[in-house]
Image (cartoon, helix red, strand yellow):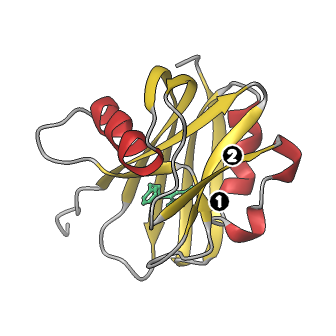
Amino acid sequence: APAAVPPKLLTLVIPFIGGQLLLGKKLRGFGEGYFNGFGGKVELGETIEASARRELLEEAGVTATAMQHCGLLHFHFDDKPQPWEVHVFRVSVFEGQPVTTDEMAPIWFQPDQVPFDKMWADDIHWYPLFLAGKAFVGSFHFKDTHTLVEHTLQEAAAA
Ligand SMILES: Nc1nc(SCCc2ccccc2)c2[nH]cnc2n1
C-alpha cells in the first residue's frame, strides 16, 4: 500500500469572550480579505498547545491565560498530497489588547454576524458546536481550497 503522508499539524485559536468572537482579517498575501481564527503550523519541538499560544501572541498580540482544546478537524484536499490536522482551541481569557499588524486586523463579532462567506467553507458547519461550548471532531474532503465536497462532524466527549 502506498506510504501514507503524515498530516500537517496546524492550530486554530479563537477567543470567545463576553459572547463575542475575535477573528483576524487577513490584510495581504494568501487568503487576503478572509477571516479566520489565529493559528498556523506547529513547529518541531513545540507542543500543540504552546504553538496555539505562540500564534495568538504573534498574530493578535495577546496572551491566552485560559484556553481549552475543543476541536480536532481533519482535512484532505484532492489537489494536495498532504492531509491537514487542525487543532481548535477556545480562549476564554487573554491578557493584553488585540493589535493590528500589517498582516492581520483583529475584529470582534457577534455569533450571528460571523462572515462565513469570507471564511473557509467548513467553518459554517462546526462553528455552531464551537459557539455552544462543545468539543467536536470532524473530517472534511475538499476538491480544492475553496470547494468542500463532503464532511462528517460529531460532538466529542468533553475535551
Ligand atoms: N478555519 C479554518 N482554518 C483552516 S487552517 C487553520 C490554521 C491556520 C493556518 C494559517 C493561518 C491561520 C490559521 C482550515 N483549513 C481547512 N479548513 C479550515 N478552516
Q: Position of residue 21 (x, y in %)?
A: 70, 40
Q: Which residue is mark 1?
A: 122
User: Dot 1: what SS?
Assistant: loop
| Residue at 76% from the left image edge and 28% from the top image edge | 132
Q: Position of residue 66 (x, y in %)?
A: 49, 17
Front one among 20 and 118 = 20
Q: Residues within 10 Å of mark 2 (few under 14, many from 20)?
A: some
Decide: is 33 above or below 69. Answer: below
Q: Position of residue 124 (x, y in %)?
A: 74, 55
Q: Which residue is mark 2?
A: 126
| Residue 54 in the figure: left or right of residue 23 | left
The image quadrant that residue 70 belongs to is top right
Front one among 35 and 120 = 35
Front one among 95 and 11 = 95
How far, Cα to Cα, is label 1 from label 2?
7 Å
Say which amino acid is labelled 2. Trp
Q: Position of residue 71 (x, y in %)?
A: 53, 35
Residue most extreme to the left: 45
Say which amino acid is labelled 1. Asp
User: Dot 2: what SS?
Assistant: helix
